[in-house]
Each structure stands twice: as structure tokens, then as C-alpha cells.
Amino acid sequence: MREVISGVLVLIGAAFMLLAGVGILRMPDLYTRMSATTKVATLGVGSTLLAVAVYFGELGIVTRALAAVAFVLLTAPVAAHMIGRASYFIGVPLCRETAIDELRGHYDLRTHELESVCFPELELQLPDLQVGRLRIPDGAAAAGRTLAEIELRRRYDVSVLAVCRGSHTIPNPDGDVRLLPGDELILIGPPERLDDVAEALKGG
Amino acid sequence: MNLTDLILWVAMPVMSLALVLAFVRLARGPTLSDRVIALDLTGTVGMGMIAAYAIARDLPVLLDVAIVLALLSFLGTVAFARYLERRVGP
């Protein structure tokens, strides 16, 4: 019985290690490859070590096997975090399909300071106004229409400060800027009207 | 098929294949970071192979080897991460 369980565990571990190998070869960029090596390979080696614990079943060996599992579970995320952090800072590219890079433009790579995306001074001095970000979802009614056509200022008292599209930003957009799904609007207006805009843009 | 044969003829080849795939990534890069994580993966898979071999050959002392390998692999990765960040730093 013990042999059967540990045999199954070893096979599971080997299968996950193979998956990790396929993942590191096939994934499109460093960051997704890293998820294969850390998560999948950790599961594989953990399963194999559990097989050792089950097969021998002596207190000393089980303790060492479980300690090894705990060690891998602790160190794999730390190592991956350090590599990912260093790689992001030295400019290892994300794959082309990446939709959101929330640090870009807000992070100083030399001083390691994160800029806030909210505007605290503005909210202090003009409590009735709020600056918000709003993403145009796929299939929204606003997608494909121009800013003039959706009439945010007349209908909701909300102004568009900028349109963020992929990596570039259109500041102070004209009425003839056409919105695409995935665009992010930087809006300024009364807080409750911003919520109305979010509701209206979400609807089909 | 007993457990020793299962490990030596099925599990070990599968793990070796994973090792080969990791080495392909190690050779291809393209960045140094990719090579570092490929090396990290070879360390992890090697640890699994040692553990499986410990069962197949009934040698529980090999578990200590696996633990040392995990420790070295972790330290190597952390050192590489520090080096990567320092290399282009101020």
C-alpha cells in the first residue's frame, strides 16, 4: 500500500516537473516562464518529497522530507520575487499581449519611489471634485464612438483629462477622439457623477 | 512492475526530459534572467530526481543531499538577482 501511494506521488511529481519544463520553454516572456518554474516545479518536487516521506515512514526521514518541502515552499517565492523585481528594473520586456503594466510611468527606477496615481492636494482643496480612471470594457456602448458623441460634459458634468491607450497618452483630447475598447479615461468631476459615468459606460 | 522499476524507467526519464527542456531555455536565453530561472529549474528538478532515486535505491541519506542542493540553488538565484540589479545600477 505504501509503495503504491509513493509510486503515484512520484509519478505526479515527475509529470509536474515535465510541465514546468514545457512551461519554461513555451511561455512568451520571462514573467510567465517564472510562474511555470516556481509554482509547477515546486508542486512537483513537493510531491516527490512526500513520496519519500510515505515510502520510508520513519520519524527522522519524514521530518526531514517535510522540512525540505517547507524549505522549498518558502524559498521558491522569495527567489522568484527577487528575479522578477530585478528583471523588471533592468528592463526585461513583457510579452506583446500584456494588457496592463500598472507600474509603468509611476515608478522611478533609480530612486525606487512609487508615485501615487491619486491627486491628494487637489482633493484637499476641491473636495467636490474627484479624479478617476475608467477603463472602456470590451463591447461597451461607448467603444467606437467619439468623445463628442458620448457627451460626458453635457450629460454628467464630467470632463476628460486624458485618454490612455496602450503605452501612449492623449492629453486634453478633442471631441473627435474615437474611443477603443481597452482605453482608459482620466476623468474629473463630482464623485457621484463619476459613478454614473462608470455605470453608463459599462452598459451595452 | 515494482516501485524501483517504475521510478527508474518512467519517472526518471520524464524528469530528465524536463531537465533537457530547462537546458534548452538555458542555451536560448534570450536574457540573462531567463537563464537564471532555467538554472533555478534545473536545481529544483535535480532535487526531485535525487528524492526519487533515494526511494528507488532505498537510500534515505540522499534526502540530505536534496536539501543541500535546494539551499545552494536558492542562494545562487538570490545572488544572481542581486547581481542583475547591481550591474546596471547607479
Image (cartoon, coloured by chain):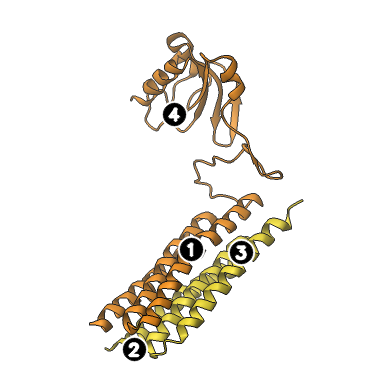
Chain shown in orange: A
Q: Nearer the viewer, mark 1 or mark 3?
A: 1
Between A114 and A84, which is closer to the camera in this rendering?
A: A114
The residue to which callout 1 is attached is: A74
Residue pictured at 48% horizontal, 25% vertical: A179
Q: Nearer the viewer, mark 1 or mark 4?
A: 1
Amino acid type of the residue that numbered disc 1 sits on in the rendered structure: Leu
Label 3: chain letter? B
What is the secondary structure assignment of the residue under circle 4? loop
Label 1: chain letter? A
User: Whole-percent x and y of residue A196?
Assistant: 39, 18
What is the secondary structure assignment of the residue under circle 1? helix
**Does residue B1 appear left or right of residue A38 in this picture?**
left
Chain B's colour is yellow
Q: Quadrant of residue A167?
A: top right
Confirm or deny contact between disc 3 and disc 4 (CB under 8 A).
no
Regarding residue B59, the answer to whether it shows in the image is yes
The residue to which callout 3 is attached is: B78
Amino acid type of the residue that numbered disc 3 sits on in the rendered structure: Val
Amino acid type of the residue that numbered disc 2 sits on in the rendered structure: Thr
Confirm or deny contact between disc 2 and disc 1 (CB under 8 A).
no
Confirm or deny contact between disc 3 and disc 2 (CB under 8 A).
no
The residue to which callout 4 is attached is: A136
